[in-house]
Amino acid sequence: MAKVKFNIPVKCGEKFELSVEDIASSGDGISHYKGYTLFVPQTVKGDRVLIEVIKTTPRFGITKFIKLLKPSTWRINPECPIYFECGGCQLRHIKYDEQMEFKKKVVKDSLERIGKIKLEFDRFASLTTVPEIIPARQPFFYRNKGIFHLKRTRKGLKVGFFAKGTHNVVDIKDCPILLEPINKVKEAIRRSTENKNVSVYNELHHKGFLRSLIIRQSAKTKEILIGLVTTEGNFDSSFIQDIAEINDTLKGNYKLVGIVQNINTLKTNVILGEENRLLWGKDYLNESLGGINYQLSLTSFFQINPYQTETLLKTVEEMLTEVKGTILDTYSGIGSIALYLAKNSVSSIIGIEENEVAVEDAKKSAERNGIKNCSFLSGTTEIHLKNFEGLSDTKAIILDPPRKGCSEEVLNSVLKIKPERIVYVSCNPSTLSRDLNKLCQEMYCIKDVKVIDMFPQTVHMETVVLLERKG
């Protein structure tokens, strides 16, 4: 049978005016031309714009924003000189209240479209029509980790983020979503890299030494940990000494505690390699959240917004207040959720984490906080959950997977364990909705949905869902 030919009403290179009707989950504006869907970057619902078509497919087209003809009432001046070049933020040109409406809609649409979950009032449940959204207390200067790429050019050294959809480095002097000291430390390292003529990695030719720069800081303790991602080799001692003196050379309250070299010799887009070498100080920083002191190594996962992380921890705690018995915290990282729950609970908390460095951090954090009702298992969630199948004392499970969501194997184990409650923490509404669909089809119902704006000015969000076993 011959394929159906689609009549695409536009051609690449064609320019015309459009009115933006909505915002896609990617943050791009959505418009239609003769029934054909067009995505318009850097726009917002209500904008009238001049665009150029740059790509067509049978289902949709991609355009390039040329000129703003009439701004939407949702639009604001982003006040960032590189905002439209940089791929770090996607929503800064939109009023913050409207960002919240956008994120709430993304979660609701995803749950209904992918999860087949109708969010409506039910007299047997406490769920309301729309998920509750919790805005950020600090929508700027909140991010506690910066990962910067480097590139040498004729005009000098670029240190910054990749432009959207490319590996072109956009030079950044002062990023408005990073904790301010991270910007200052990054600029000091730029100067030292230039002054000491440190070899910089060339991704195209797979040559050079310094690949990426990672700077972590605790908003509470103010401690700073620096990671230098390199190919195989050693730094000149004078370069490391230069960086180590940041506490003295920068004006202000800076507490650099360690410099770690991470070795990545592979020709890959993956930033971190497997080997770490301590060059100066210690290989971790101290973080403090919700009354818990955490040990945080360079490669360990930790939420990037400390202010909203406290909101997340309290939200999970409230959802599990009535649980008495063993709680499993899967994909537990350095134990941020597990340790917080254990501090204020008589329940036994067991964290499961694949990253061995993170597990060591979690165990040391439990020891330094005197927490004895919390333990950690090293290995995959798939392997460890099988050991809890058929045991009756597991009363709740926390699922906090990466963006890809839970595997079929994990969901099947959860359904065999049959906990009274599940709290699913997700940074990806699509995979969250897919997994909830399976859990709700089998034996669970949704009792509460909260969207936490963990990543202001970006399209990303954290969603926390409470599920209870039916009957």
Image (tube, rainbow, N blue to C red):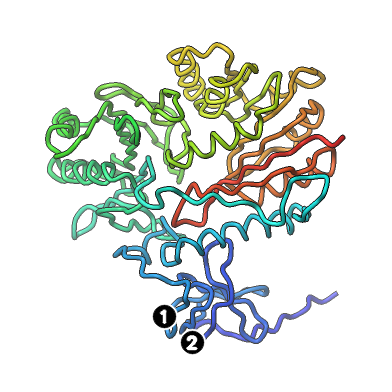
Among the 4 quarters of the image, the one containing residue 464: top right
The residue that label 1 is drawn on is 66
Among the 4 quarters of the image, the one containing residue 387: top right
Residue 312: image x %, image y %? Answer: 54, 38
Give the number of the disc on residue 192. none
Label 2 neighbour load within 10 Å: few <14, some 14-19, many 20+: some
Label 1 neighbour load within 10 Å: few <14, some 14-19, many 20+: some
Residue 249: image x %, image y %? Answer: 12, 36
Q: Taking 176 as reference, is 398 left or right? A: right
Q: Taking 216 as reference, is 418 left or right? A: right
Q: Which amino acid does label 1 sit on?
A: Ile
The residue that label 2 is drawn on is 15
Residue 108: image x %, image y %? Answer: 67, 57
* The N terminus - image quarter: bottom right
Report helix, strand or loop for mark 1: strand
Label whose residue precedes the other's in the sequence (2 or 1): 2
Residue 113: image x %, image y %? Answer: 74, 59
- Residue located at (28% from left, 45% from top): 180
Measured along the vertical axis of the image, is residue 316 above or below residue 428? above
Q: Taking 336 as reference, is 380 left or right? A: right
> How far is disc 2 from disc 1 in space, using C-alphas?
9 Å
Q: Are marks 2 and 1 in contact (CB under 8 Å)?
A: yes
- Residue located at (71% from left, 24% from top): 385
Measured along the vertical axis of the image, is residue 343 above or below residue 22? above
- Residue located at (57% from left, 28% from top): 332
Q: Which residue lies furthest to the front in this view?
A: 123
